[in-house]
Amino acid sequence: MSEALETGTPSFMDRFPQEASVVRASLISSFISLFLGAVFGLIQALHRTDVFRFLDSQYYYTVLTAHGVLLVVSFTIFFLVGLFTWATVRSLDRPLVDIRYTWAWYGLMVIGTLMAVVAILGGFFPSTDISADVLFTFYAPMQAHPLFYGGLAIFIIGTWLAGADYFRAWYAWKQDNPDERIPLQAFMVLTTMLMWYIATIGVAIAVVVFLLPWSLGLLDSVNPLLTRTLFWFWGHPVVYFWLMPAYLLWYTVLPSISGGRLFSDPLARVVFVLFLLLSTPVGIHHQYVDPGIAEGFKMIAMTNTMFLLLPSLLTAFTVVASMEHGARQRGGTGLFGWLRALPWRNPAFTGMALAGLMFAAGGFSGMVNAGMNINYLIHNTIWVPGHFHLTVGTAVALTFMAATYWLWPQITNKPIFSRPIALAQVVLWFVGMALMSNAMHVMGLFGVPRRTAEPQYQGFDFVASFGSITELRMQLALGGTLLFISTVLFVSNIALSTGTPRMSGLGKQLSEPLSPAADSPKVLDNLTLWFGIAMVLVVLAYILPLASIITDSGIVDPGVEAVPMLIDAATGLGPIGAVSDAAGRLVAAVVGVVP
Amino acid sequence: MGEEQVVREIGHDEYDPKGTLALIAVYFVILLVMWVFMYFVEFLGNELTVV
């Protein structure tokens, strides 16, 4: 690519072709997951609103599990490792230590994903013994095929090794630059991976010690509350694992695209340190209605959660201030008039800005979720999916898609097939999500449950204070359809971009922060210190609740029987069939007795 | 691409993000109004729940 060096800014691919291949492969894996997940999302949106039901409702949980796992595990995390590989190599300005090792962790992640996906899709084929209709949250006593847990474990090992790859690169860089501050992007990658190492302790124990041996038949039973608590030990920080790559893009790429500079490098570092410290000791806020955990422990989790608002509000300030700096450099004036000077025709900018706007709305519904008392109003209602479709479903997903329009040319040396389609795509996502998420939030307030194939009951109607439930259902279905169209536009635009002619000089420079790292104390870069404090906080938040769960009901609870999520459609004798038959008879009996 | 259209350089000391402050103030007002609204809809609008 020597000619590229002569004609314009060299791209990432020109400078690090081997690493660019890994980034491309990770992004492609991510987008395949996105497309499949979106298909299942559409089926679900049309099914539960009763607009179009072509699958029997007994398959709803197969669809729901596939949607959840493909999107929040595969799509997000494959994108993360691709982006982090790019960010590490770019910011340290040196290749990874051993590219064969890099391909090895990528391979493990692919194998893990395939195993889990085979187990989930097995649910569509009752003749096989394979199924994993346990949803993304895989609570015991619902039991999946060992392939599901095994795949998950291998996938997570892959991510651990990816993290080690970034630390190796940083260590090698440090030998050559002993007195320099860690470059900002590398700092973000490393703190996020440290958070991930702490967070995955929970899920690793849940899966490897309990759920996998249990599904293999080596353990007779598990303690559902214990595995559930271990799940949420990981289940909350994982949302920041999805979010941190988006933050990395908002802090380091968005200011440049806006035409400005990051307002403050030190503030960005503080935010990532706060996420490392506070992401994990909050998981119990997902268990506010779980019996078996004392209210006091839930109160501590709530307090920690409210502290977590701080780094997000710091981010809102820093990122918006960086955008405003860009707008004013582009000639914008006035208290609000500068907003017009932003590059709204650039899909990468518009997508990320709209994603940030939706995140602000998600912040409000998140505060409702986090409050122990008001959480009861919306717990297990469709409000909750409404919330996380704003956060992971838009703040994260839309940022990833928008950033791809910026990053893709630099890792392929090929321009995006169509920028107008890209712009329409990000706007369509915003509109679709505004409709779908609004409908979900409002329906949640009226008590419509989540995770339900047919939320309609004989003799009972949900009552809307304004509008009607039917109207809200249509809004949800329409929003879901627009989101699916947007996904198709995105995936096909990227697929067609592989056919555009190769060009040179597609590299982009990132601007320097207004306030550089040198303005902050060196202790911010002391990763050992922050990791240590984070571990102490986790121990403080979890040791007593876990001890009390184990004292109350044991490491394993012999009274709990597994519910294999197998559907035996042929004979109707599967556990699900039996349970729903029994429930049906019970309801009939009650209805018969009660006048 | 939009990022090349910078018409003037603004340095650290001459930049005052007052537009950001205004936007964040608007966000806080929205949050406040929604909290008050929620109090009326969810607490005063529902009967007491006794479990």
Image (cartoon, rainbow, N blue to C red):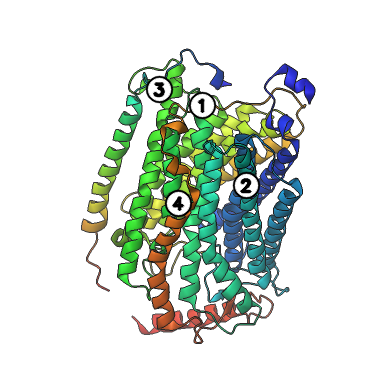
> Which residue is disc 2 drawn over?
A166
Q: Position of residue A413 (x, y in %)?
A: 73, 29
For marks 4 and 1, give the CA distance: 26 Å
Cβ–Cβ under 8 Å for marks 4 and 2: no
> Which residue is disc 4 drawn over?
A530
Cβ–Cβ under 8 Å for marks 4 and 1: no
Mark 4 vs mark 2: which is more N-terminal? 2
Q: Position of residue A3 (x, y in %)?
A: 78, 20
For marks 4 and 2, give the CA distance: 18 Å
Q: Amino acid at mark 3?
A: His
Judged from the image, the secondary structure of the residue bearing numbered disc 4 is helix
**Mark 3 closeness class: few <14, some 14–19, many ≥20 residues within 10 Å:** few
Split into 4 quadrants, where in the image is the N terminus of chain A? top right
Q: Amino acid at mark 2?
A: Tyr
The residue sitting at 70% across, 54% down in the picture is A105
Frontmost of labels 4 and 2 is: 4
Split into 4 quadrants, where in the image is the C terminus of chain A? bottom left
Mark 4 vs mark 1: which is more N-terminal? 1
The residue sitting at 53% across, 53% down in the picture is A194
Q: Is residue A210 left or right of residue A409?
A: left
Is residue A538 in view? yes
- Choose top left, top right, bottom left or bottom right for residue A40: bottom right
Q: Amino acid at mark 1?
A: Glu
Chain bearing mark 1: A
For marks 2 and 3, give the CA distance: 32 Å
The reply to whether label 1 and label 3 mark residues of one chain is no
> Which residue is disc 1 drawn over?
A512
> Which residue is disc 3 drawn over?
B12
Is residue A137 in view? no
